[in-house]
Image: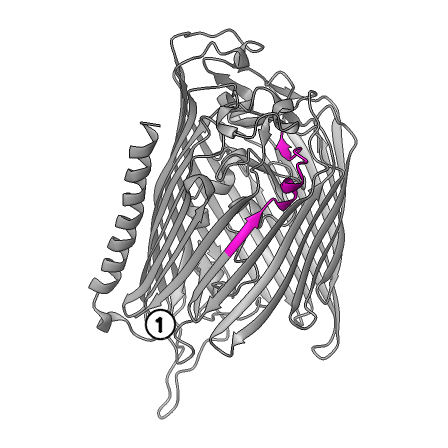
Amino acid sequence: MSTTKPFRLQNFVQIWRSVFLILLLSLYIPVQAQRPLSTVDSTRTTYFSHSFDSLFLGKVHAIDTNLLYFSRFDFTSLDEFGMATLSNTANPARSLFFKPEIYYGYDFYPSAYRLYQRSGKDVQFRQPLSPLTEISYLMGSKREQHLRVNFSRLVAPRTVVGMDYGLINSPGYYKNHLVDQNNVYFTARHNTSNLRYGAAAWYFHNKLTNRENGGIVNDSIFENNIETDRRLYGVNLQDAQNRMKMSGFGFEHYFILLPQVLHRDDDTLPQKRNFQLGRITHHFEYLRNQWVYSERSPLENFYKPYDSVLNPQGTYDSTYQSAIINRIQWSSLGYRMHESPPPLHLYAGIELVNILQSDSLVSNRYFQLNPYGGVSINLLNSLFIDGRLKVVSGNWAGGDLYLEGAVKQYFGTSQRNLGNLYGNLLLANQSPSWFHQRYYSNHFRWENNFVNTRMLRFEGGYHIKGISAGAVYNLIDRPVYFGTEGRPRQSGGSANVLQLYGKMHLSPGNFDFIGRVAWQYADNDSVLRVPALIARARLLYTFEAIKNVATIQVGFDASYHSEYYADAWMPALRSFHMQNRKKVGNYPYVDAHVALKLKRARVFFQATNLFSLTGYSYYFTTPGYPMRDQRFVLGVNWRFYY
């Protein structure tokens, strides 16, 4: 306890210091620098992701300010079918709805932590109509705290700067289960007045610390309610932790090849070209990743079934990556900012990647030269076709290939909507991850010579008036997986996964009903295992308490998945692996909340895992890691305009 209290006080001071500095920054920049971008509602804010192409293709999204999903505060709760976790916020997680791992050339992000790893591909460029600061704060039981601050404003004509800061601190219910996460983005972008040239830049930094307890020692004590004080439970690891740092910066700029104006006649407006040669875009990014697993007691019984320990005095397994990525791309986009996909969009480019990969013993450098391209077709705003191709060459993953396609056909008219038919296809020839091929640590060591995995994934379905039904077929030839002994293995055969799903969002009157259900079947349970049934539902009742001032929402969330042998978590590998010891599932998770929207402020109060009050204590999604007991959560979101 003596070490916990000072840490918590320091963290609390850090939170409010950050809030104060951000508010001070937003007030310091002269208000006169903010020019209105439009005559529409000045409180409306939109964003586009990562690339100027998204902006010109009309892939612009409005910032969500309603109550529909406001109470889903945890990243894992945003997955439409739900995720298996280690119970605490920002812990490793994996989707219950099976999706194959796709690397697209090199594996920079451990899949179990992908939800919490922000990089250049996740950058959002906001488009505020007036200076905006948005603060979100959440407080949960066991002194859990979340803070999120967004800031954006126009500082000069056509020049926007922004910042996105996030903090999560959650001590957890059990010993040595604390999570501490910080991440920040800084962004800036500028366009010339005629839109012929534009540039954007970003910097990001992520730091995540997960104390690893290896799960509780005896599940039956929890399941039979023998001990209700979770702090007294024995855990497998007393002083282990994973630390991850990911940082980097990048910029992108484009230049349209032909000028906008062809000629100017007397007393006439400028004439636009009917034909364009497109634009050239250059993208640069630098990435730096470091992962460290450390512990003072490597001889714990938890690790006895695995490789012999090299250093019994302590573990410090460090992995380092850095990469420099350059892309040169031509696309058919011109000056027009499309509100819907253009009739034809073509792009092609080449990507140069230089990689440094090292651990305590070996340092390797790799390079890749990867051509890629794509096409999008819009026929009469009713048939949309997309295709993408990427080929990898170089001294790592040379010969890998990724081919993706999508089609969507709308039926009916704007007055009579008959729905749409959609389909998606992925074909991949993919090298195993560097992590599967070679790894050297205090507890695990291997050198493999795995061959490429071939994948086929096809999805098709139909959507009409808030209801969707579809199927997904996955064929994985020679899959790589982590076996029960915690080591990577490659199957000489194949695995087939069939998934059928239904989705629904109906809004009768003041009610919203959002439902998801999926059935899954995997034919090779020695390679991968999935829950056969997944279901999730959200029932909401929303009404105006004071017209145009206050809106109140009452809602329930429920989720369920059938029983199966879920993968276990291996802290020293930062990976899930197969196990035959325990089945988890067949438990309903039920949450209830009340939310209020008052002008620009939103507040919610939520009670979670209500079914645990029945005394039925079998709420696991990962073996050894009970989900959190019934608890209360309070969240606030407030937007400030200047």
Magenta span contains residue 611: yes
Circle 1: element type: loop
Residue 411, percent across and down? Answer: 75, 69
Q: Residue at x 73, y 37 (%)?
A: 586
Compared across the picture, whether 488 is left or right of 26 comes to right
Image quarter in which the N terminus is found? top left
Q: In this picture, is 13 found above or below 46?
A: above
Compared across the picture, whether 296 is left or right of 469 comes to left
Compared across the picture, whether 337 is left or right of 541 comes to left
Q: In this picture, is 279 found above or below 326?
A: below
Compared across the picture, whether 524 is left or right of 9 comes to right
Image quarter in which the C terminus is found? bottom left
Q: Residue at x 59, y 64 (%)?
A: 344
How many numbered callouts? 1
Q: Which residue is mark 1?
A: 194
Front-lying residue, 142 or 244: 142
Front-lying residue, 371 or 356: 356
Occupied quadrant, residue 398: top right
Residue 53, percent across and down? Answer: 47, 59
Front-lying residue, 473 or 575: 575
Residue 113, percent across and down? Answer: 50, 36
Q: Is residue 431 visible?
A: no
Q: Residue at x 51, y 6 (%)?
A: 308
Q: Residue at x 66, y 43 (%)?
A: 611
Residue 72, percent across and down? Answer: 54, 52
- The magenta stretch is 605-622
Magenta span contains residue 86: no
- The kind of residue tagged 1 is Asn
